[in-house]
Image: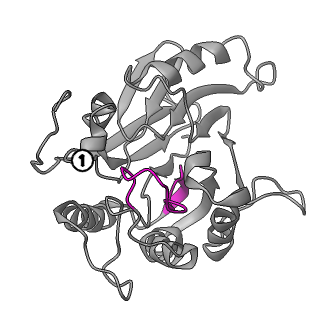
Amino acid sequence: MSKTYTVLLLGDQHSGNEMGLLHPQVRGYTFANDWQEYAWECWKHMKSKLPRHIDVTVSMDEALDGPAKPNTKYRTQITKPSMQRLNARKLLKPIVDRSEKFFMITGSNWHVDELGESTLVLAEELGADKWSEKPDADQIGYNLFLQFGNVVLDLAHSQSVVMVNRSMPPEREMRYRLVDDPFRGDEREIGFIARAHAHNFNLSWDRHGISMTCPGWQGPYYDYGTAKKSMARAAIHDMGWVLLKVTPGGAWPVIPYVTLYEQPKTKTVKIGE
């Protein structure tokens, strides 16, 4: 009987943003709003439901919100990179401790400091696994390929900016992989693609494999006037986590189990106001 592996996908906690996840034990900071308090309760629920042993956890990233932006839409609660990392460590360390392997993926340029230094430091602080066995291998990168027997998971943070068409970008990438699969010819094949960044969950499952956009943990900017132009995107935020069961050689090699949390009622800014 083939072994089944558990793979946890987490992302977009946006530590440091006032709509991101905040650990209440970070000294000097309190919940900025009802969303943060609710998200923390959901995070605790997730930890209580996770298996005691996880084979692989992947931080799909933007665990850190990064430096403060001049755009008032993105309001920074924690400005010091070291404090953002402290918050992220408190959130992720209990999960890393129950994971046999832990990988981190680079987020978008908008949310990393110069050269992504703070994210690299966070990877070191959390003891993230290197991406290869080479002595000089990185602990963080853009496109992670995880292999379990003949099954390959294709994981990355960024996707097309055309995110209002929710599942389309990863689904399109899955079809591209049919003619540009780097593993084709050696009895391995990419059968699962996951992307983050859009803060929404969608799933496309067909004969080619599974393509997915992962939920995040940052709340939507419903009640800010700056949300008008991006209302379509703001309205589709999903919060939750994805646990994959990967069974090489099984009838269903990859089965995703998805938990989504109901969003609290929030004032909505209508386009044109």
Could you say where residue 21 lies in the image, as x and y percent from the top left?
35, 64
Viewer-side residue, 192 vs 251: 192
Q: The N terminus is located in which quarter? A: top right
Vertical position of residue 262 compared to residue 201: above or below: below
Vertical position of residue 176 compared to residue 135: above or below: above
User: Can residue 237 be seen at all in this image of the molecule?
Assistant: no
Farthest-out residue, bottom: 27
Residue under the point 52% across and 36% down: 195
| Residue that badge 1 annotates | 224
Are there few (<14), some (14-19), or many (20+) residues within 10 Å of tag 1?
few
Q: The C terminus is located in which quarter? A: top left
Give the residues in magenta: 54-75
Indicate yes or no whether the magenta region holds residue 232: no
Could you say where residue 152 lies in the image, as x and y percent from the top left?
64, 34
Residue 31 image-quadrant placement: bottom left
Indicate yes or no whether the magenta region holds residue 60: yes
Could you say where residue 202 lies in the image, as x and y percent from the top left?
36, 29
Residue under the point 19% across and 63% down: 38
Residue 122 image-quadrant placement: bottom right
Q: Amino acid at mark 1?
A: Tyr
Side of 170 relative to 204 (left or right): right
Vertical position of residue 144 compared to residue 13: above or below: above
Residue under the point 47% across and 22% down: 162
Side of 179 relative to 108 (left or right): right
User: Can residue 177 be seen at all in this image of the molecule?
Assistant: yes
